[in-house]
Image (cartoon, coloured by chain):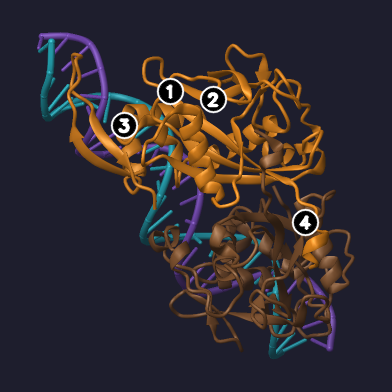
Chain colours: A orange, B brown, C cyan, D purple
Amino acid sequence: MTHNLVEKPFITITNVIWSFDAQTHDIKLLLIKRSDNPFKDFWALPETWLRINESAHDATLRLVKEKLGLDLPDVHAEQLATFTDPSRSPEERALSLSYMTFLPQQPLLNPGPGATDAQWFTLQKQKSGLFRFKNLDFVFTTLADDDYINHQNQVADKHLAFDHNWILTVATKRIMNKLNYQPTILLILGPSFTLKMARHVFGIFGKTEPDNSNFLRNHQDLLQPLGAISQNKPGRPAKQYRLLIN
Amino acid sequence: MTHNLVEKPFITITNVIWSFDAQTHDIKLLLIKRSDNPFKDFWALPETWLRINESAHDATLRLVKEKLGLDLPDVHAEQLATFTDPSRSPEERALSLSYMTFLPQQPLLNPGPGATDAQWFTLQKQKSGLFRFKNLDFVFTTLADDDYINHQNQVADKHLAFDHNWILTVATKRIMNKLNYQPTILLILGPSFTLKMARHVFGIFGKTEPDNSNFLRNHQDLLQPLGAISQNKPGRPAKQYRLLIN
DNA sequence: CCAAAAGTGTTAAAGTTACACCCATGC
DNA sequence: GCATGGGTGTAACTTTAACACTTTTGG
């Protein structure tokens, strides 16, 4: 435990930022195009360096604030995993402490330092169950359980920087696993949402879209009813619900 | 993303090492007594520094090898979480990448560098559902879900170094959560085990010990039967099973 | 034949799914 | 009144839990 001999890696905060397009009902993921090596001109997940006096959680929120100019007080961020393979970065050693953040909107993006572009990409679920980006020739997938575990080293990162392909695979898998007991992904719908929208999101990450008559019955512990809010459409105004986390 | 300005924290690997006493049927946890500041003379989880050319997973296995003189080829280690609060270490900034390891035996311990003592402590479950160490006046607990989430900063570490109390709480919670779909905790029983022992472990981490007649029926996907192995006891020899992960 | 462990059979209870239909409300 | 979203009722089906009892096998 001799401090002086310890060579230290860089600490990267990698943020998988999810959102929802209220018009098209699409799931969105934020990618930036890197302006510098390594992986210059590759699409990548937004990242920042961890500062010496902040927690990784705080750094994740700072990243959202800096990149998106968003200063919402109640942005939810949760730890995904930490990636430490020495070969994950081709130059200096860098660990990735990765988080997921759920935003109810897609603010206009300006690339900011380190990036030449920043875009919200649409998530598409394919018949096979794999996920891909619309308008980006890249399938980052979700594999069957038995393939998943030992797949890490086989993932050829042809389209995303570093191991961000793998990080997205883990992120998607996590959301699917938590869908029925802690569906924090619903936070992309904002602080309140309708059952219809919630069922739509469940349909994307779950096997099928749940039956409307059973959905509330099966998830009453997660959903707190709020007042109904009227819309400018014909039909009964949708009732709003709020996600209860534990 | 200016590299040169980045001040780097230390990277600690913290390992929650679980084991099982085949004689007494007790769950064991490995603690060491620190020989140096900070937290000199406090009990703590085994730790090591991450080296510049190894993954955190490799460092976890190296820690087991170094501390225990164990060179089993098939030790299972899994990531628990990463702890990054700037105040978690009173002197230099140090992140903890924490892992769990499951050992089928408790090798004789020699404290090794950085420690004046090393002991296997017995885990006790109290009526309240909280866990404590036998022979160590310390309740590290598992809290109800609603308390659990925001409890991190309230945990007074009176008896364990750093935030190791909290790390153990998270570790125990993780094992409980995974019990019914990926009970890797069973690996403390060794590469093969009997249904009786598996039910015993389920009884400690679950609500109650499961009924023998239902146990195999409900967990067939996790348990692969091996040949029966005869004992030197009266009665039908116990059949051995192996844990299937995924 | 006794003890220990595994396994079977059966029923009750609880949870989930499917589907037909009713209700509420703004335009 | 009609479109829309929510809600009710109910039966079929699946999963889990409880418990009594049988089978296996070494000493």
Residue sitting nearer the eye, B230 or B62: B62
Q: Position of residue C17 (x, y in %)?
A: 43, 35
- Residue linked to disc 3: A195
Disc 2 and disc 1 in contact, CB within 8 angstroms: yes
Q: Position of residue B185 (x, y in %)?
A: 67, 64
Whether labels 4 and 2 belong to a single chain: the reply is: no
Residue sitting nearer the eye, B217 or A182: A182
- Residue linked to disc 1: A106
Whether labels 2 and 1 belong to a single chain: the reply is: yes
In terms of secondary structure, where does tag 3 sit?
helix
- Residue linked to disc 4: B50
Subunit of mark 3? A
Marks 2 and 3, Cα distance to the nearest angstrom? 25 Å
Q: Position of residue A64 (x, y in %)?
A: 49, 34
For disc 2, the neighbor class at 10 Å (few under 14, some 14 to 19, many from 20) is many
Marks 3 and 1, Cα distance to the nearest angstrom? 21 Å
Label 4 sits on what residue type?
Answer: Leu
